[in-house]
Image (spheres, grey):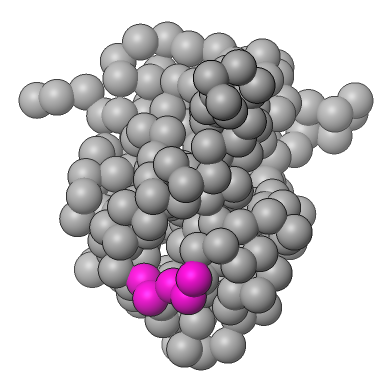
């Protein structure tokens, strides 16, 4: 059996006397969507930031492609193939789609054979190719991304991750603050990523979205793993009980 693309074992992160996450373990397979669920303060953000190089863990191990790994910075995580897409998307609103896909890694050309200049045509062409693979309708690629809808902006952020060969995509509340049609587009994007063999960690408070895309659901409570279920073998009520800490027996009778 192949190793999971990502393996986390006993991961802990403390901030002074506060144990933000404590002894969290899970596996993530290629072509799988793992949902992280939990109330505010449950440790979801700390967990993904510790995996993606924002925080250094106090204990535990992270294995990527079967190799033990540590990331000192988010850039190291991105270069290794782990891309985190936060709710604010980290897009430059004044730049077009191509410039955002290549943000910080711009393609250059020689103007008149001498002067370096941005190769905007190449960047837009490459951006168009990757956006097309996501099957999302996009207006002119020379428009600033502030002119795009929420779902289209998500597609740009996801397209950037795919273009730079991310194998693990961590998506932090990608459907928050979106209308229902845009939420459906983002759900469709996540399903297309899974079909393409990408591994996705999906954080959401919306149980409808979680059950629409997740293969497995990992619930955190007060920084610890409260439970893990296959989405097809559980339901909203059980996940809510795990989130709030109410036992199955406590609800019986």
* Residue 88 position in % (x across, y down): 71, 58
The residue lying at 56 percent from left, 62 percent from top is 142
Q: Quadrant of the N terminus?
A: top left
Q: Is residue 33 magenta?
A: no
Q: Quadrant of residue 238?
A: bottom left
Depth order, front residue of 38/29: 29
The residue that appears at 29% across and 68% down in the rendered structure is 135
111 to the left or right of 132: right
Asked if residue 215 can be seen in this view, the reply is no
Residue 223 position (above or below residue 145): above
Q: Residue at x 78, y 27 (%)?
A: 14
Q: Residue at point 72% right, 26% down?
A: 55
Q: Is residue 75 left or right of residue 27?
A: right
What secondary structure is the magenta-colored segment mainly?
loop
Q: Quadrant of residue 147?
A: bottom right
Q: Is residue 246 left or right of residue 27?
A: right
Above-or-below relation of 168 to 71: below
Instruction: Inspect this view and state whether residue 197 appears.
Output: yes
Q: Position of residue 49 (x, y in %)?
A: 66, 36
Segment tinted magenta in the rendering: 136-140
Whole-percent x and y of residue 237?
45, 79
Q: Going by the picture, which residue comes out furthest to the left?
A: 1
């Amino acid at each position: 059996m192949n190793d999971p693309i990502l393996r986390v074992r006993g991961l802990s992160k403390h901030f002074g006397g506060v144990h933000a996450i404590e002894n969290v373990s899970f596996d993530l397979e290629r072509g799988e969507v793992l949902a992280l669920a939990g109330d505010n303060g449950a440790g979801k953000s700390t967990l993904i930031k510790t995996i993606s190089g924002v925080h250094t863990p106090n204990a535990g191990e992270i294995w990527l492609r079967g190799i033990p790994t540590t990331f000192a910075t988010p850039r190291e995580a991105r270069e290794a193939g782990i891309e985190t897409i936060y709710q604010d998307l980290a897009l430059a609103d004044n730049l077009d789609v191509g410039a955002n896909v290549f943000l910080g890694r711009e393609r250059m050309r020689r103007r008149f054979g001498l002067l370096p200049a941005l190769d905007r045509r190449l960047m837009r062409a490459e951006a168009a190719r990757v956006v097309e693979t996501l099957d999302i309708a996009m207006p002119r690629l020379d428009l600033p991304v502030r002119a795009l809808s929420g779902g289209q902006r998500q597609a740009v952020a996801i397209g950037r991750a795919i273009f730079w060969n991310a194998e693990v995509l961590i998506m932090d509340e990608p459907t928050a603050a979106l209308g229902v049609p845009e939420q459906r587009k983002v759900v469709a994007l996540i399903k297309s990523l899974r079909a393409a063999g990408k591994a996705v960690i999906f954080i959401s408070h919306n149980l409808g979205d979680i059950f629409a895309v997740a293969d497995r659901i990992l619930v955190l409570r007060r920084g610890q793993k409260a439970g893990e279920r296959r989405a097809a073998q559980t339901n909203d009520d059980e996940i809510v009980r795990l989130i709030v800490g109410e036992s199955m027996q406590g609800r019986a009778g």
